[in-house]
Amino acid sequence: MKKKERLLSFDEPVSFIFAHSALKEGWDNPNVFQICTLNQAVSGIRRRQEIGRGLRLCVNQQGLRLFDEEVNTLTVIANESYASYAANLQQEYVKDNMAAPPPPSEARKKNATRNDKIFHGSKEFKDFWERLSQKVSYRVHVNTPELIRACVERLNAQTIPEPVLVVERGKFVVKRYILRLQSVRGNIAMIELEIADSEGTINKDSRPILKKNNLARVFGDDRLRHFQVLEIQNGKREAKVIFSNNVELGVHATLTFESEAGQVISERTSKPVVATYPVFNLLDRASRELGLTRPTLNAIFKGLHDEHKKMLLRNPEGFAGIFIQQIREALADHIVERIEFIVEDGRIERNLEKLFPLKKAFAQRELEEADERTLYYLLQADSEAGRKFVVQADSEVERVFVKRIVRPDDKVVFYFKFPAAFEIKMPKVVGNYNPDWGIVRFDGDRRCILQLIRETKYKHEDELRFPHEQRKIKCARRHFKSMGIDYRPIFREFAEWWRSENEIATQGLFDIDKVEKDQRQPQTKAEALGKVSKGAA
């Protein structure tokens, strides 16, 4: 493929690649997360290449490899033979004395049934959604001079790259493949492969071939993938090999075919360009993309260092990309610090039947075992009650939260994962927000019902990888506070997750060790039996 760097850049809107050989030779991008195989790949080498591309550790924008298992997940949409190959590949790793990898999980979706005992029969569930259906609007109190100052500071701290001219010199090379059957002895055929390219290079290789061998795997060349041996005949008159593509190869006979032309890069040079270029209307473009006025953008441009301004003439596109992106980031931060949410008269009509349909398909790998206090279950013949309650969990930290924290807590009335269709409207530059968990729980004395929304994160808020995550959490705090709903992000230790941020700030945390012991380890045998019985129901 041509222009790979541009195709893979964040500025390029393309997010789907359809190609017959993208995952083979010459593809050096580690960030492959989904592979949909439309072909019937018979070559084990090709399959190993394709899967291997997706199994590489991904790399972030700073060029650092990520070791997070929740990020490094490869999904393969494939036929049964491919699935069988993936399973066998696991065994090959073990035979090669490598550590046994985790088995591939099933990605097919399963239909779950809604738990109407909660959906229709729980007053607490109805009250929770009544509060969530309040109509809320927002206002942003923009301070234009402060915004201009923040944008100028960001831009002056950036390095704008010099333009670089890349020159590639190469040739289109055609390869000719010649197969010769040299001899047949018993059930073994000796086949010679000769490859001659249009540059005059000739390579020969002879290999013993058995029935069911694929020449692509034997010779290590995927262009031979259609030559799978069906039969080896060693007759008195004539010996020959019959392939799966209905081609026969006799002794001392030759079979010739040519590959498609392929581009071979022989030289690649890059050099800086010292020149100026015509400049498009930067302010108009930035105004359309950011929604800011031309005077505001002009004031930002005027505040830049002279060296930065000169780069507009020397690298217009590079300058524009950085100019718009950095202003967008500064604008998002400015909005988050100055946004106000107001509860208005009226309600938002939410169709709960669409948000929580009677039957819903979940990917198998997304489901975590739950109990009767959640909204969905799977019908299972081998279960004592015929039901297995499940809840969607998209990461390991969510699985731990359900398994070790929520399920053992007998004060929880119900809990559910918000569906992706439930979004809180935020300014466009921030992006709409989909919270994680809706939970209703009794307080410590069982006198009061707590309506809780919790965001589960592996890292603390100030350690989150992406700024947009922090911004959404900050906006969500103000949004739910205006509605009278207790919201906060909770992290991997989940200490006193049911308490509000304001309560923790004023009173501090309780004895965390005692809290965790009370939640996770029943104090008496009777309590233990009760909790085990509850978990099995």
Image (spheres, rainbow, N blue to C red):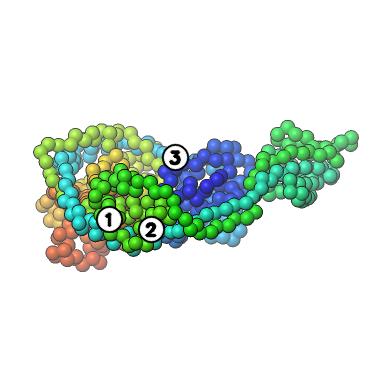
Q: Are the two marked residues, 3 and 1, in contact with CB atoms closer than 8 angstroms?
A: no
Q: Position of residue 123 (x, y in %)?
A: 16, 40
Mark 1 or 2, closer to the camera: 2
Vertically, is 464 above or below 391? below
Q: Quadrant of residue 80?
A: top right
Q: Which mark is residue 461?
A: none
Left or right of 49, for residue 243: right
| Local SS, label 3 | loop
Q: Position of residue 434 (x, y in %)?
A: 28, 46
Left or right of 428, for residue 57: right
Give the residue drawn at x 43%, y 46%.
Answer: 12
Looking at the rendered image, the quarter that the C terminus falls into is top left
According to the picture, the residue beneath numbered tag 3 turns out to be 108
Which one is in front, 156 or 274?
274
The furthest residue to the right? 237
Q: Position of residue 474 (x, y in %)?
A: 23, 54
According to the picture, the residue beneath numbered tag 2 turns out to be 310
According to the picture, the residue beneath numbered tag 1 turns out to be 300
- Identified by mark 3, the residue type is Arg
